[in-house]
Amino acid sequence: MSERIDLRAERMKAKRRKRVMIKSWIILGQFVVIVALVIALVAVSVSNANLRGKLNGNDGPGTQGNVSDNQSADAASRQEWMKAEVNKWYLQLVNPDVSVSEEFIQNVGLTAIDARFTDGKASSKYFDSRAVAALNEMCEAALNDGIRLTCISTYRTYDYQQGLFNNRIQRYINQGYSQTDAQAAAARVVAKPGTSEHHMGLAVDFNSVEQSFENTNAYKWLQKNAENYGFIMRYAEDKQSLTKIIYEPWHYRYVGVEHAKAINDLGYCLEEYIEYLKNGGK
């Protein structure tokens, strides 16, 4: 009886060994198939890459010559783009040394800013029609963050600027300045007619024309977010020798999102950035 039991046990062990061997062969076969598929995919990829290389005039994919040629071509293209951008409307340079014509000033395409972001009166303030949406969106975003941005000065006519300039000269004369000195001092604070960015409808003064504006939450918000809407603080404290305008933390200028971010990243004022573009980024 015990011999039969032992024989049956041996048979069962043999069957189990057979099943284990079969499973091992199946697993091994699956592994071989997977390896074969991977090798085939790599071969196809290399073949396609070689074909692309030949179509591009190269012997193979990723050759040093191909990479260098592409980089050179991209750099040249980028330089040409930079030089062309200088002449775009959103980068037009206006400063004490570069004026715009009265004809240009009178023919700027203007659209009223959303009254919620001015003094509350309909059509009280205007901005370049191509950039007014960006200004409204920025003010809206600030408001959603609990920050009130009020556009207290935007587009100005030649005559309006002349009045501001004359008033500033008179204030200095009343303080004892000579006519010549009063004009020079006034030009540092109020742009001469024809040399103000406000003529273009691309500049906006926010909330308060006082340097204490830099201590407000509105200023902090603008420093962090203005570039996302294409605006830069135009007259920085450490760039006065280049802009020839006093530090104005309230004065922002539209230049487009890409350029606003580039200007801030480079730490440039607009005068420096224009030269940078003219030189193809050098």
Image: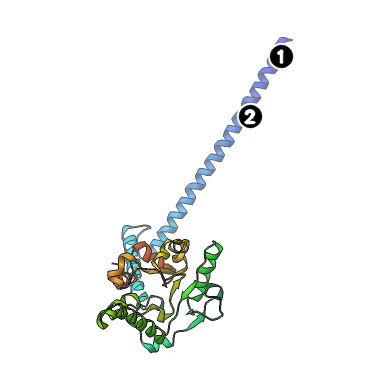
State which quadrant residue 69 falls in.
Answer: bottom left
Could you say which is closer to the camera, residue 192 or residue 77? 192
Camera-side residue of 248 and 134: 248
Look at 28% across and 71% down and name the residue there.
Answer: 242
- The furthest residue to the right: 1
**Mark 1 element type:** helix
- For residue 279, which quarter of the picture? bottom left
Q: Is residue 135 visible?
A: yes
Quadrant of the rendering where the N terminus is positioned: top right
Q: Which residue is mark 2?
A: 19
Residue 224 location (% of width, % of height): 44, 61
Point out the tag, 2 or 1, that comes first from the N-terminus.
1
Look at the numbered discs 2 and 1 and tell me whether their residues touch, using CB distance below 8 Å. no
Disc 2, SS: helix
Distance, label 2 to label 1, CA atoms, is: 21 Å
Query: Is residue 79 shown left or right of residue 153?
Result: left
In percent of the image, x 47 and y 64: which residue is there?
218
Q: Give the label on residue 105, or none.
A: none
Crowd rating for badge 2 (residues with CA inside 10 Å; few <14, some 14–19, many 20+):
few
Mark number, residue 5: 1
Type of amino acid at the residue the image marks with label 1:
Ile
